[in-house]
Image (spheres, grey):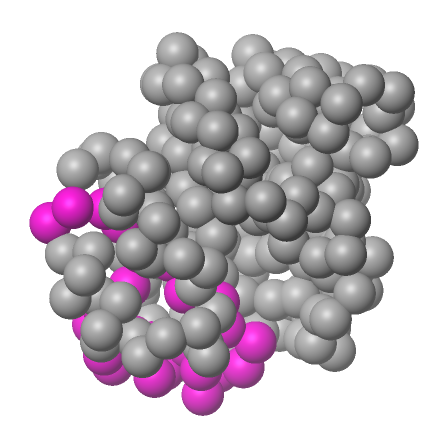
Amino acid sequence: MTNFSRETLKLYFVAGTQDCRHLPHTPEQNLLGVLETALQNGITCYQLREKGAHALQDEARIRRLAGECRALCRRYGVPFVLNNDVRSALAWGADGVHIGQQDMPLREAANLCRGKIFLGISNNSLANAQTSAAAACADYLAAGPIFPTQSKPDAKAPVGVDLVRQVRAAGIAAPLVAIGGITAGTAPLLRAAGADGIAVISAIAAAADVAQAVRALAADGAA
């Protein structure tokens, strides 16, 4: 099992081929190119989230892509996380898996992952976070969407920076990453509110200059 710490969450990049479709090459080439640039410039964790109408649909193709993403992450010493599917994450050699509240029973996910891969759980309310923390099953919690986001068409209503403050005020000490519409300009607000890190999709994947975008996002976290 790859070592996990709060530092892992500092700058967490989440993306699939659907987030890089504005680029001119094959879906896989587009994503792998963005990912390698992001790895070279300071991301601390990467999650493959291949999801939505424009995502790859063939499981064999997704598995090959996951293997290539994992190999890149290994080269740069950064954890590789798979979205939603605990069993695939285990079978495909991921370092971690990230699930939503409704993807599968949280304790079942924890039992499958324990001692093998780390587990992250999405939360869009204080009640969700309390449930996740009480179950003592998550290695980290994700809070969001903080701001409006275009990366997830099915995203819930924004919860604002206050959710991060509420989680910490409630005494929940678990590693916490904020996600949803975050930019280099708003990242300091989340860290000041108590988040251990930020997770972004389009702030990196859709950036005109990926290297510069990653460095800007990482700058505050290194301060």
Does the magenta portion include 191?
A: no
Residue drawn at 48 percent across, 22 percent down: 68
Residue 64 visible in the displayed image: yes
Where is residue 54? Give x, y as percent: 78, 49
Q: Which residues are magenta?
A: 115-138
Judged left or right of residue 26, residue 217 is left
* Quarter of the rendering containing residue 212: top right
In-front residue for pair 52/46: 52
Does the magenta portion include 137?
A: yes
Judged left or right of residue 158, residue 36 is left
Where is residue 205? Give x, y as percent: 74, 33
Check the image and report above or below for 149 versus 204: below
* Quarter of the rendering containing residue 56: top right
Residue drawn at 79 percent across, 65 percent down: 153
In-front residue for pair 59/115: 59
Residue drawn at 56 percent across, 12 percent down: 40
Residue drawn at 66 percent across, 32 percent down: 217
Residue 7 visible in the displayed image: no
In-front residue for pair 64/51: 64
Quadrant of image for the N terminus: top left
Residue lying furthest left: 115
Where is residue 16? Give x, y as percent: 64, 40
Where is residue 77? Give x, y as percent: 35, 18
Check the image and report above or below for 174 versus 177: below
Judged left or right of residue 54, residue 131 is left
